[in-house]
Structures are given as C-alpha cells and as structure tokens.
Amino acid sequence: MQLSFNSKNYPINYPNKMSGTLTHKIIQKRDYIRVDGTAALYVQIFLDGKRKKLPLNINVPPKMFDIKKQRIKGSSQIAKDYNLIIGKKIADINNIAVSYRLSGRYLNLEKLIEELTNPTAKIDFIKFWEQQLEKQKDLLKPGTFRQQKSTITKIKKFRNSILFHETIN
C-alpha cells in the first residue's frame, strides 16, 4: 500500500489494522471414545494466534471420519446430512469473515464466536435488544434496567419475534 502525503508531509491515508489469518478445520476428538463407539466432531478455528474448538454436535465412529478431507465417509443419508451440517458451519464462518472484511471492521475470535453462536441477533430485533441490554446492565440504573426488561417482556407477549426486515402495519 502506498501512502499519500499532503503538503506538510502528514499521511492522508493510514493503513487499517486488518484481521489476522482465519483458518479452520474439522477435527475428531479421538482421545475420548463414547460407549457406543463414536467420537465427537469439532470445528477448530484459528484467528490472531488464538485457537477455539466448537462442538458440531455430531458423533461418528473414528473409522467413518476422513481426516484428510475433513468429512464423513460413506454414501448413506446420515453421512450426507452430517456433511451438509459441516459445510453449513464452514460457510457460516466464511460469511462472517467476509462481512467483517467488506465493512472494514476488525474481526477477533470473540466476535466470531459470538456471531456463530447467536446469529439471530442480526435478524431478530428482540434478541438484539436483549443482548444489548445485558451488555449495558452495569451501566444502567437498576430501575431503568427493570423497566427495559419489563418492556421486552410485554413486547414478547405481543410477538415473540420481530425481524429487522419486517414492518408492523
């Protein structure tokens, strides 16, 4: 990146701190085999020198998991469904990374995990409101916090979910 300078030799454009390299892989926890002979699958995420393992809630026998391809072996319907679940999780990770990169925001591991585990906050206004209220709990006075919680409860009685793209007529 080439910097441009104004007449006083101050840079006009500064380099942005971008997210580190995001990598992920599907692993099987082979050190713990369950009684039924299966082992759990995880997605292992590396970002900014940190590692996090997220469970996929899939358990398969070790001989059915292809370590190199990071997929379930076989042509049965259950293997196809599990491979779709794995592909969906990887696609979700990539979509979050691309969204942050295109918007110029810095993505760290904590933000990635939060987006992965609670995607409804981007879609559902009530979930978003509840999350924001919990984040601001220490900043708000107790009476204000109770009032906001009461308002959310009343709105949930009216409608359990309000999507951001909806308009109420």
Image: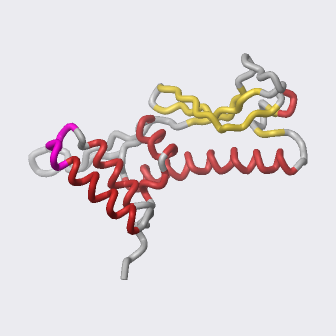
Judging depth in this view, the residue of 34 and 90 nearest the camera is: 34
**Image-based side of 152 in relation to 28, left or right:** left
**Image-based side of 104 in relation to 83, left or right:** left
Q: Where is residue 139 shown, x and y percent of the image? A: 17, 40
Name which residue lies at 11% across and 51% down. Answer: 7
Instruction: Residue 73: name its quadrant.
Output: top right
Q: With respect to residue 105, does 163 lie above or below?
A: below
Instruction: Residue 141: name its quadrant.
Output: top left
**Image-based side of 34 in relation to 63, left or right:** left
Q: Where is residue 137 shown, x and y percent of the image? A: 24, 41
Q: How is the image coloured?
A: secondary structure
**Image-based side of 147 in relation to 19, left or right:** left
Name which residue lies at 78% across and 30% down. Answer: 67
Name the residue at the top extreme: 31
Residue 142 falls inside the magenta stretch: yes
Residue 65 falls inside the magenta stretch: no
Q: Where is residue 5 shown, x and y percent of the image? A: 19, 48
Name which residue lies at 62% across and 34% down. Answer: 55
Quadrant of the frame with the N terminus: top left
Name which residue lies at 27% across and 55% down. Answer: 150
Quadrant of the frame with the C terminus: bottom left
Q: Where is residue 167 shown, x and y percent of the image? A: 38, 77
Magenta residues (range): 138-144
Name the residue at the bottom extreme: 169
Judging depth in this view, the residue of 111 and 47 nearest the camera is: 111
Name the residue at the left extreme: 8
Q: With respect to residue 123, does 53 lie above or below?
A: above
Instruction: Residue 65: name its quadrant.
Output: top right
